[in-house]
Amino acid sequence: MDKTDIWSENMSNTPVTAQPSNDAHTLLKQYGCGPIPFSGTDNAFYERHFVFDKVLDKRESTARDQFEAFARSVRDVLSQRWVLTEQIYGRQNAKRIYYVSMEFLIGRSLANNVTNLLLDPLIQDSLKQKKLDWIELIEQEPDAGLGNGGLGRLAACFLDSMATLQLAAMGYGLRYEYGIFKQSINDGWQEETADNWLRHPDPWEVARPNEAVEIKLNCSFELHNGVLRAIPGRPSTMIGIPYDRPVVGYGGKTVNTLRLWAASAADYFDFREFSGGDFVGALAETLTAETLTRVLYPDDSTSFGQALRLVQEYFLAACSVADLIRRFRKHNSDWNLLPEKVAVQLNDTHPALTVPELMRVLLDEANLGWETAWDLTRRTLAYTNHTLLPEAMEKWPVAWFELMLPRHLQIMLEINQRHLDAVRTKFPGENERCTRMSLLEEGSPKKLRMANLAIVGSHSTNGVAALHSQLLRTTTLKDFGEMFPDRFNNKTNGVTPRRWLLLANPALARNITEAIGDGWIRDLDQLIKLKPLAEDCAFLAAIRKSKYQAKSEFANWLLRTSGVKLDPDTIFDSQVKRIHEYKRQLLNALRIVVLYNRLRQNPELAMAPRTFLFAGKAAPAYHFAKLVIKFINNLAGTIEGDPVVRGRLRVVFLPDYSVSMAEHLIPATEVSNQISTAGYEASGTSNMKFMMNGALTIGTRDGATIEMAEAAGEENFFLFGLTADQVSQNRTWYSPRWHYENEPETRAALELIFSNHFSRHEPNVFEPFRQLLLDKGDYYMHLADLGSYLAADQQLTALYKITDAWASKAVLNVAHAGRFSSDRTIAEYAADIWDAKPCPVS
Ligand code: 26V
């Protein structure tokens, strides 16, 4: 990529104040906030919210009231920029980018918005004046968990980068009343409870009932003995109400919008019907629509095909298409301009019904012919794939479309017919190819394949790291790669350095800024200037000090929030992510069992004291993943109870992993575990966050970890294990039993587990591990990689003893992390897929 137009334009585009100004009035004036003081008098920004929003005496306020007042005053500061941003986009008739995603894992917004508005100095003054505790204030805000994991957090990082790069972009998602479940641990087992994150009014969101849209389904629903049943042939309507949240670009110039749709049928209560006695039908309609956006589906690996999830997906697609078309029509009368003025990025196949929905609007509402509608649709839409796991590929029963969306089914069947004609023309006589490429999967029930729909209905299909994109094109989607070679491309993921470095790790951020200035915040490639400092003893000492500070702060936070005490003089070694077989938390646990065995056998053995940190949620129905959580907790308990190893090895499972927890844990981590079976982790993004926070990675050659090691030099990584090629070749002859029989440490670790050493009171609870690892062929090849994992681990702990050598590698990792900024990723999407230029708001 040439560094794209975006980059150069962006660089000349200074923020509201190039440097955070200490002069509060000047800064506020630049946000159009006139002479109102931020705090002080009763009429000040902060104080007036108690009186005028809450009708409350400030002295009677709770911590939550104070958070709301504070957040509302920050919102006041950004509001005029927010209005102006949309005005300028309209005035310029800018090309709009729409990022459509079922998930946005936003986390907390207060500190992030303050940072991006450059309000930090002002806020610190004001807090001092008011004797408010910043930490307590920001912890009042619920962590907006509207996502499962990587895919949802990526969407949130992208919003930050799109606003920072001044793109006329908007996110579309669903306003789930309940986000990802809260996880607690009971007797080692995961338990789930509802995440009622909207219990209190959310100070960021703005409801816009005036911009509500109507969505029609060809069936209704009724409640029958507590079960929701579809009634065919009786159409119903849902209302989508937009709730907007500000997305502040760094520097505070651009304030974009994340628009989340809430379903409602309240306005559609048909009282005539109601009084006529058919109140069950009317009630059921209300119930369905209002339940529709009630909860996020917490499964990120299996498409277990719940009808309600399909309706959620359609609802997102239909609301978003209606909204973006309305905005397009406001400034353009010629439908042919659609691809020039609108780019829609589909975050996985979850919003893939955007394809037939846009077709429907162009055919039935704009009255365009098929060829024109198809051409406009394809040139407007683009699709990102985030996984190769076959079980995560979405397929929906044709019968459900017959029932709910017959017009969409008709359109999809027509798309399929024309698509298969084209396949037959290009590959005459290849019937099997046609069967594989069809949007329809034969069988009972007959299903529609959403990935095929998204590829055929768009002009771009991208993977999220080089290896993943290559595997997509050459294996999983090989037929499509051959049919449409120009459509396939790679966009390696990135993460926003504002949240993940500047905000999360102030000590390291300060080190960096003191050494190279603050240009890195908007141009992360500037971190390369740190490279020569990897040899500078004073700088290495400063880096060690900031890491120790982050470790201590994390330990304090953990003690305060959960009572768990950590020793910052041990190595902090982390694996935090969704719990999944392919991510191999079990492999990590086996490594720890081996180390534990070594110490039990030889208590005199010199071994650096270590703290192994785990966090992550398992899908509620994923029994094996839940058993892994149980094992980690039992392992933690057994080690803690064993006087020989206590204080030398420590295992901690931190319940309820969230964006906020990651912001504390990642800066404190020294060793990042990225140990998926090669070929299965599409990209990974926590790997990048750890790297830019100066952790060293122990990992497999998978996803973006490969590119990270390439950037920093493999000598600065601890890579081990089978490559993706070897994994696919070894599939046929791999024998986990061979490892069990020939590797004494592997065998001893497994024997210890099977002897109930970690389950004295729950005999045989871990027997499924025997079946998985030994009897059923160990699909994810844990045993194949355990030996080399241990060898890499040995090298790593040896290096740790040489403090300068370790710090030097940490600096080299940070210095080469520039490429993993989501600014770079977004600049590539803008240049290669969206053809979008910045639209500065000035
Ligand atoms: C999958 C499914 C399957 C159907 C049911 C609902 C549902 C919900 C979420 C998902 C997400 C699976 C895909 C995913 O999260 N992929 C992750 O995307 C990250 C961002 O690109 C990437 O870094 C991770 O490697 C990849 O696993």
Image (cartoon, helix red, strand yellow):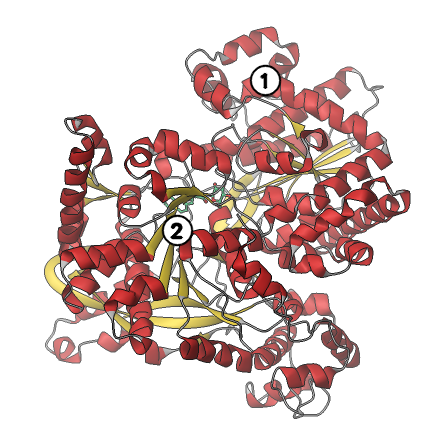
User: Residue 149 vs residue 536: left or right?
Assistant: left
Say whether residue 529 is left or right of residue 174.
right
**Residue 164 falls in which quadrant of the image?**
bottom right
- Give the total number of marks visible in the rendering: 2
Q: Nearer the viewer, residue 33 or 202?
A: 33
> Callout 1 environment at 10 Å: few (<14), some (14 to 19), or many (20+)?
some
Whether the residue under disc 2 has CB within 8 Å of ligand 1: yes
Q: Could you say which disc has been placed on residue 297 in the image? A: 2
Question: Could you say where residue 618 lies in the image, as x and y percent from the top left?
Answer: 49, 41
Give the quadrant of residue 405: bottom left
**Residue 518 can be seen in this image:** yes
- Residue 445 horizontal side relative to residue 560, left or right: left
User: Residue at 71% of width from left, 23% of height from top?
Assistant: 595
Residue at image position (27%, 49%) is 457
Element type where label 1 sits in the image: helix
Amino acid carrying label 1: it is Leu
Left or right side of 842 for 434: left
